Amino acid sequence: MTLKNAINLFERFVNETSKTSEIKIYREFIEIIKSLEMKDLSKNDIQSIENELENLNLKSNFANRKKHFSKAISNFKTYLKDTFSLTTKGYYTTFYGGLGLVFGLLFGVAILSSLERSLGISLGLIGGMVIGSIMGRSKDAQARAAGKML
């Protein structure tokens, strides 16, 4: 499936459905594919992406389209990340924010336990999330500067 065909397919899906959750997924696919078209990719890279789109089995008719396309977009993003080191906007902010929450919880329980327990956990979570988000934004800015963001 070529990139143009994929865009046309998803635009047709957007016009066929009235469910906003499905439309959001289809539009995300369209944005990713359009940004891939604007990247300076070799013919082999484009062929590889088109093969991956074909492997996602997008043209089949499924009973639960939202679930299928949610999995498909997740697999496609993973493929782009692993193969070409391309990430979507906010990828690292979300990733590092989640890590910050985990380490903030651990920090709150282990270090700030001298305070009231819930206060220590709360402060750890907030601090971890803030630090993780700051680190993630920095990493997103680096990816954008390197041209690795979709």
Image: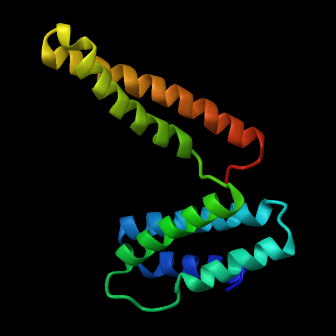
In the image, taking residue 74 as reference, residue 52 lies left or right, namely right
Residue 38 in picture, x, y percent from top left: 79, 61
* Viewport quadrant of the C terminus: bottom right
Residue 58 place in picture, x, y as percent: 52, 84
**How many numbered marks does the figure carry?**
0
Rendering quarter of residue 79: bottom right
- Apparent side of residue 42 relative to residue 1 in the rendered image (left or right): right
Residue ID at (49%, 80%): 13
Q: Residue at x 70, y 36 (%)?
A: 142
Does residue 97 sit above or below 51 in this rendering?
A: above
Where, by quadrant of the figure, is residue 3 drawn?
A: bottom right
Residue with the most extreme front position:
110
Asked if 61 appears above or below 104 in the picture, the reply is below
**Colour scheme of the rendered structure:** rainbow
Which x, y percent locates residue 113? Answer: 19, 13
**Looking at the image, which residue is at 25% across and 19% down?**
110
Question: Quick check: 81 above or below 146?
Answer: below
**Residue sticking out furthest to the bottom:** 60
Q: Position of residue 133 (x, y in %)?
A: 48, 30
Residue 8 in sight in this render: no
Q: Is residue 103 left or right of residue 60?
A: left
Depth order, front residue of 128/32: 128
Question: Measuring 35% from the left and 74% from the top, which residue is drawn there?
Answer: 67
Q: Is residue 147 left or right of residue 101?
A: right
Is residue 125 positioned above or below 33 on the image? above
Give whichever of 85, 144 is nearer the camera: 85
Of the 4 image quadrants, the one containing the N terminus is: bottom right
Camera sees residue 105: yes
